[in-house]
Amino acid sequence: MNAPSSLQERYLDLLEAHIAQPAHDPQANAVKQLAYDISRDLEAGTVSTSDLEGLAKTLSDQALVARAGRLSAYMESGSSDEALARFDRMVRASAMGDGGKPIPFEAFCMRWQRSSFGFVLTAHPTFSMSDKLRAIIAELATHEAGSPEYDAAISALDGEPHQPEAEQTLLREHKSAQGALKRMAGALDILHRQLVEIARDLYPLQWAAFRPELSTLASWVGYDLDGRSDIGWSDSIGFRLREKADQLEAYAASVAAIIEKGPAGPNVAESLGELKGKLERAAASARAEAQAFCADMSDEKAFAAAANRLTDPDPDRILDTKDIRGILHELIIAETSQDVRIELIVLHAAVATRSLGTGHVHVRINAVQVHNALRAHLGWTGQGALDGRLPLSNLTAEIAATKPAAINFASLENEQTTALRQMMLVARFLTLIDRDTVIRYLIAECEQPLTAVAVLYFARLFGIDDRIDISPLFETPDALERGNRLIEQLIENEAFRTHLEQRGRIAIQTGFSDAGRFIGQIPAALAIERLQIQMARLIDAAGLKDVEALIFDTHGESLGRGSHPGSLTHRQHHIMTPWARSWFRRLSIPLKHESSFQGTDGFLLFETDDMALRSVSGVLVAENSWTVNENDPFYTDIAFTWDFYRALRTYQTALYNDPDYGAAVFAFAGNLLFATGSRKSRRASESGGGRSDLSRLRAIPHNATLQQLGFLPNVVTGFGTAAGAEFDRFAELCRRSPRVMALVRMIAFARRQSSLTAFAAQATILDAGFWIARADAGGPGPQRRGCLTLAERLRGNGTAFAFARFHNRLRTDLLHLEALLNELGSGVNPLADESRRALYLLHAVRIALMMHVMLRAADLPRFAARNDFSREVVLDLLIQMRVPEAVDLIAETFPRREDTGSSVPMHEKADFGKDRDSGYPHIHDHIITPISDVYAQMRRIGIGLSHRFGAYG
């Protein structure tokens, strides 16, 4: 057996020699050559698949350790104490007025008694790491190298595979989100305490009147129905009730801790004891209600029991926090111990921002679901029934005439349209579980005002239009291009404007992930920034007074889904720039900004109490300490930068529409992905390889596939080409513009983690010419025959040519980009970057393993075709790396052991075959088992590759 370290050293030496080859052959590909070296060793028996598994594990471990180091730096504070010190400096700086004196107490309260930011956890399918792997990376990110904790985490990596949990369920995702929310809530309690102590220091006579509210927490895990139909209404009710019980128990525990501190005020301890009992009884009531909804709701008795349990009177049930907040307010006034008073204020802040749940609820559906419900409910079923101005006018009149309808759980169970059923569910939440907390109603793919007005109509139908915020999502090219007009039309609509003024808030959601998929991440970020600014102008122009603007920016932690890799500050200032924020301040429009933290990669920032405090405080410092450069030439030289934006967007749009792009994405890499969430990563119609499929492929598998291919064209490309016409002028713009340099740093990081060389090498396995050349190069007779078999099968396959054309297109652009990066001092040198050489090696190992799978497939004996299944079908499946499907077909055709029927009683004796295995064990041992094992290895390598990018998908 070859030790991973010796193999790594040997193959890296070979790689360096191959990297030098372009000096003699400009078309030489170092990754392809190294993959061929490894493949020859593997087929010759010099190395085994077990050896390569060990090497890949070592390389993946190294990538994870490097990822943990970047994650630690990303949080900006090296410890909880440092995080608190940064937060303290930020708050004190905000409180300083002219002459170094504190601003008036009222101004301080105005700044810190309103949640101007919100954290939102989502269940996007990025659950690519096991729980143990997450714990390891958290330990590495929070301890110094060489410490006992760090060394223990390194040891724990030994034998831990790079793969997700085998079970991917909504219940696991909800549990993971709730764990993160609990730690985030703990961090907010600490920061609220710090904020109160600062107020006491700055305003010693007034501080007790301070009621801080730093941020809200929210989640849509268990409530998001966009693109999925597997979440029943009773599931969501059960989740919400469990969250309520958990939060009430947390409040009761906080009260118990305050009692232990020994309150000194008159009757304070007694009142706290009564409050603790009230909270404990309410928690038990909510827990029992949740348990009732765990039963099988298809059982009529269980259904009736659960529904009646929640709707029947219960003296212990709490439906709002008004009384709790009132009691706490009175106790704060009555208490004389400053320490206890601070704890009471902190608890008041928790109740004010979390109410009766661990987080606010976001529900999400898509526009098609809304339209279907509207047609069914109003009978608007004709062709074009929802088009034009007349339906909007008619719907507005319907809203004015609508009286709320009474519903019960039977109404919910019987409703067939998703949008109406989801609105009924929201009504149940607001009536029977938590009457305090406004619910966000997110509408995906919203491109016309009628959609949002229809949601308002449904809300009016159930009497909850004053307690939901309707939020269209802008993520498609059309929505981003015309989003300002849609917002304007909603403000102009009489019913919707009344709703906005009643709520005191106008809400939108932006989608970096999908926008970046369609038009590239850099153009998407610029288009979203433009929409944010337009929203401020529209609110001002419409004269909406005392209406808060709420912008929820949805993005992942990866480059391909809109996250900046620099730091938490870069992250927050990328999704909403200081320039965009300044427009709301300039126009005196209150702004609440929210951003998403998606799946494993997002939750990882809050994996431990220490990380939660560092991350929550880091985000809040970034959100509250931005400055705008009024002279940034990106914003002042509008004609030049607008030309650049249009050129960049045009390039990315053309790239996305290139059929060669779709051919590369659907060639095989997507079939090497794990299931990383309970939501399906592909719709049923996305199994083929045509261009139309690419437009429907969801953002996460799209980006995950690009990571597997080794290059991120939706992030890296276009910038160089767009700058090329006036290169020197653009380089000078980059140097002088903080905005553009932030984008350059993002692109430079993506370039360092990407490899166009690796991308081109992937096509080797699909190139008939390669297999012919390999056969011609010699080798054992069976291997030579296998190469010729593969060459023959690939002769009509045009995917390798598509790869080559697409590679040439990308390479041309990359020449311009690298010239720019070198000019700016951000170039990439593969020989000088040890981690980049490791990336090349990891790609080469997997390409060699893919070659191994294909050579084993070529060993499959010929057999008679049946039911449209033939040897050629199996070869095609394995060429696409659809290994599980191929293995099932092979096993069906060649069972390990045949049932010979020997148990049938026969009078005539026979001795032939009694000692012979009647199945095909050699097929299983030589083909099925090896390729199944290698397939598992290749998928684990995929997770190792994703570590390079700092996030999955």
Image: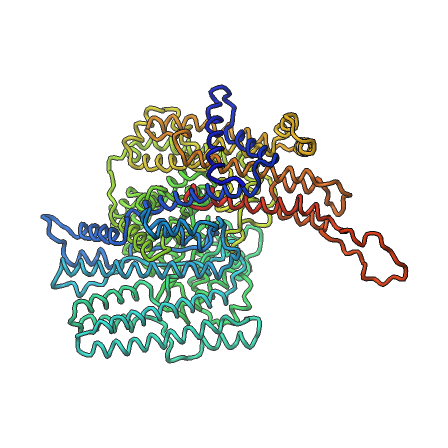
User: Would residue 491 be seen by someone viewing this image from the given angle?
Assistant: no
Q: Quadrant of residue 80?
A: bottom left
Q: Is residue 125 left or right of residue 87?
A: right
List the single residue furthest toward the left: 99
User: Would residue 304 be seen by someone viewing this image from the given angle?
Assistant: yes
Q: Quadrant of residue 779?
A: top right
Identity of the residue drawn at 81% across and 54% down: 914
Total number of numbered discs in the rendering: 0
Q: Position of residue 128 (x, y in %)?
A: 47, 50
Q: Position of residue 394 (x, y in %)?
A: 47, 57
Q: Position of residue 814 (x, y in %)?
A: 44, 28
Residue 823 to residue 122: above or below: above
In the depicted view, which residue is nearer to us: 470 or 890? 890
Give the position of the N terminus as an image quadrant: top right
In the depicted view, which residue is nearer to us: 950 or 684? 950
Q: Position of residue 75 (x, y in %)?
A: 32, 48
